[in-house]
Amino acid sequence: MLRALVPVMVAAAMITAGGGEALAASASTSELPKGFLLYEAKAAKPAKSWEKWEVSDSLGRRLELSPCARDVGRDGRRAMRTITYSAETDYLSEQVVIYRSTRAAGKALRAVRDELRRCARGGSGHDRYAYKWKKTGIGDEALRVGGFFFESRGRYLVVRRGSALAVYVRSGMVTKSLPSSQFRALEKDGRTMADKVCDLAHVCA
């Protein structure tokens, strides 16, 4: 598996246990209709032997972009769904979080920015990493981010629209200038979801 995305995958695996997880899933499902995310249909199809899809409605997962591997952006969540895909050399994820207010969603994105600054680079040897980021014109505010690791690289897009936050992640080539051409697929998904969340009650009002 790509070293670049190991922190992301570990974070994605950390969910609340027992009855708390069941309650979180129930609350999330009521806010995000089944099939709402862009990759849900693909995730529901039979996977090939070397592939793995996971769909979770847990409110306790970390954001898929978590540079310091800390659990930020949890306050005020009222719904959340995360889809992950992994194969031998590929990783893809889609995550939509609905917050109780636009303010809470904005606070979550600010926390991501703070994490990027705090953990812009670190580690040594095989564990060294660096992040680069810049604003991009999607939704109310958005960032595209490149993750640079010893053996691989990752591309991230985080978009806020109203009280919703959407995160898209893909493995693959990215350079430090973060050209839009390297984020075309993620930005297409981000724009689609930025429009789609406005169909949900109280998100863009």
Image (cartoon, rainbow, N blue to C red):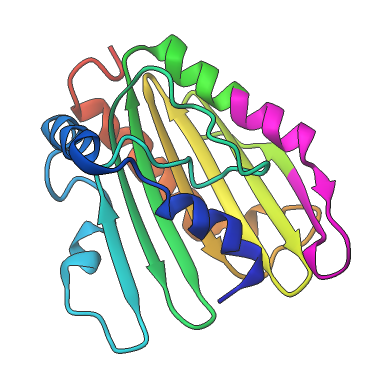
Residue in the image at 30% along x and 89% along y: 49
The residue at the point 70 percent across, 56 percent down is: 147
- Residue 75 lies, in percent from the top left, at 43, 19
Q: Is residue 42 left or right of residue 12?
A: left
Q: Position of residue 17 (x, y in %)?
A: 29, 43
Quadrant location of residue 144? top right
Task: Tell me the magenta residue range.
Answer: 111-132
User: Relative to 86, is 127 above or below?
Assistant: above
In the rendered image, the quadrant that contains the N terminus is: bottom right
**Residue found at x 88% / y 61%:** 124
Determine the residue located farthest toward the front in the rendered image: 18
Q: Is residue 121 magenta?
A: yes
Q: Is residue 167 left or right of residue 111?
A: left
Left or right, 171 with reference to 59? right
Relative to 152, residue 203 above or below? above
Q: Nearer the viewer, residue 184 or 5?
A: 5
